[in-house]
Amino acid sequence: DRGMERLNPECIKGMNNQQGHNRLAVDLPVYIRYGKHPFHGGRVSEFAEDGLTIEIRALRLPVGTPIELELSALGTSWRVPAIVTDEDPSNIGVMFCETQDALFKGLAEQSRAVRAQPPSTDSAMMHTRL
């Protein structure tokens, strides 16, 4: 069992680049809590079983920062511990401390129900607005 405190930023970036999970394009509000700081809002733009991408403004979180995500989806509230794996001026990438299979599968099923049409040939991603 690797403790989060032993993961250095370069190791974390390497893990982030090796993600091979299915990805789901979404538009979902999320709140981020880190340390003793209050919640800061952002929007999830891409979701996978092991992590997600958050569009965020005016917040810089270094790679390796442990955070807690709070989001509402599928009729319930979710609180998910995660760690920052990538950051740039407008987005952060995070990896969940535990995979979120139930949440991902629920969002994917909701996406299919919303679309109710074959996926386009130019994109393997499913799109939904929640």
Image (cartoon, rainbow, N blue to C red):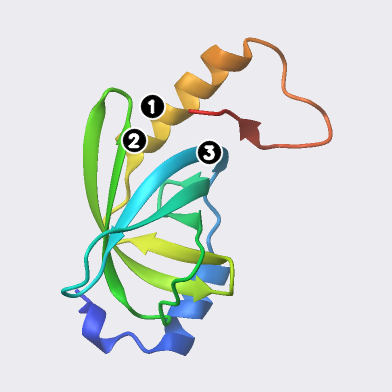
CA distance separating discs 3 and 1: 15 Å
Look at the numbered disc 2 and give the secondary structure of its residue.
Answer: helix
Position of residue 63 relative to residue 104, above or below, is below
Q: Earlier in the sequence, mark 3 or mark 1?
A: 3
Residue at 19% across, 75% down: 35
Residue at 34% across, 39% down: 101
The one of 120 and 46 positioned closer to us in this rendering? 46
The x, y position of residue 49, in whole percent, is 41, 46
CA distance separating discs 2 and 1: 5 Å
Residue designated by label 1:
106
Which-is-in-front pick, marks 3 and 2? 3
Q: Find out whether the residues at labels 2 and 1 contact each other: C-beta distance under 8 Å.
A: yes
The x, y position of residue 27, in whole percent, is 53, 38
Residue designated by label 3:
27
Which-is-in-front pick, marks 3 and 1? 3
Q: What's the amino acid at mark 1?
A: Gly
The one of 35 and 94 positioned closer to us in this rendering? 35
Residue designated by label 2:
103
Q: Few, some or many C-alpha atoms within 10 Å of disc 3 (few <14, some 14-19, many ≥20)?
A: some
Question: Which residue, as the protein is rendered here, is positioned at the far right?
Answer: 122
Look at the numbered disc 3 and give the secondary structure of its residue.
Answer: strand
Residue at 26% across, 88% down: 6
Q: Is residue 16 left or right of residue 33?
A: right
Q: Is residue 59 left or right of residue 69?
A: right
Q: Earlier in the sequence, mark 3 or mark 2?
A: 3
Corner quadrant of residue 69: bottom left
